[in-house]
Image (cartoon, rainbow, N blue to C red):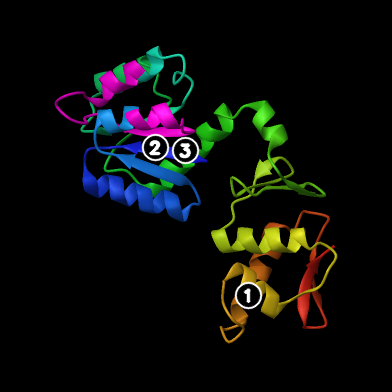
Amino acid sequence: MKIYVVDSDEGTRSMLLYVLGEQSYTASGFETADSFKAALRTELPNLILLDSVMTEKEDGLSLLKWLKADRRTASIPVILLMEKATEMDRVIGLDLGADDYLSKPFGILELLSRMHAILRRTEQPAQREQEPQRVCQDLIVYPERHFVTLHGKELHLTKKEFRLLWYLLENRGNVMTRERIMEYVWDADFDVETRTIDIHINTLRKKLKDNGAMIQTIRGVGYKIS
């Protein structure tokens, strides 16, 4: 998933790029409208986080209006980041085509939650069908988005839990030793505290308790999903 962050404030832009990178998004930041428009000519993102103020040359609302007037970019979802926004500012932003808005300062967890909801809602059915996935009983894992559903509902996993689950599913039926799991999930040698694996396995078991496929411990040596 590609996210464009358009914000003239370097601190906000850098913080958002860091957070999005930690969430496995591919994110690019832009300080000016001109640099943002140039990037759009090369590649379109899945979502835009747009500062409503921007610069004196072109504010965020004008940029939003321009985006929605262009057939090539009109369908890209936009979340407005609004500083000291009045009710009228919010109404204008939504009327111009914004999918959502957040008032600065905002909470990162709230931002991510709103992003996930919009991306799920706007994703094309054809894209879903083409995306690689792993299915195990009622559990579906989408590696490109780091997205997991269980019984049709989103299952929230940390990055390490996701990598662990994906690795076990990729090797379903095979016993994976702690050494191999540590090398894949943590990119580390086995001299790292192995209790870490047990903790993550137990957490995954609790989150998957309603699924028919269970993570099994094999004689204290390793794990497998069956």
Q: Relative to 176, say whether 16 is above or below.
A: above
List x then y, in percent, for residue 157: 59, 56
Left/right of residue 197 with respect to residue 12 in the rendered view: right
Q: Nearer the viewer, residue 77 or 210?
A: 77
Q: Which residue is mark 1?
A: 182
Hey, what amino acid is under mark 3? Met
Dot placed on the residue nearer the N-terminal end, 1 or 3: 3
Q: Which residues are magenta?
A: 38-66
Q: Is residue 55 magenta?
A: yes
Q: Secondary structure at mark 1?
A: helix
Q: Secondary structure at mark 3?
A: helix
Residue drawn at x 75%, y 59% as measured from the top left: 170
Hey, what amino acid is under mark 1? Met
Left/right of residue 98 with respect to residue 167 in the rendered view: left
Question: In which quadrant of the rendered view does residue 31 lie?
Answer: top left
C-alpha distance separating marks 2 and 1: 33 Å
Q: Nearer the viewer, residue 52 or 29?
A: 29
List x then y, in percent, for residue 38: 34, 29
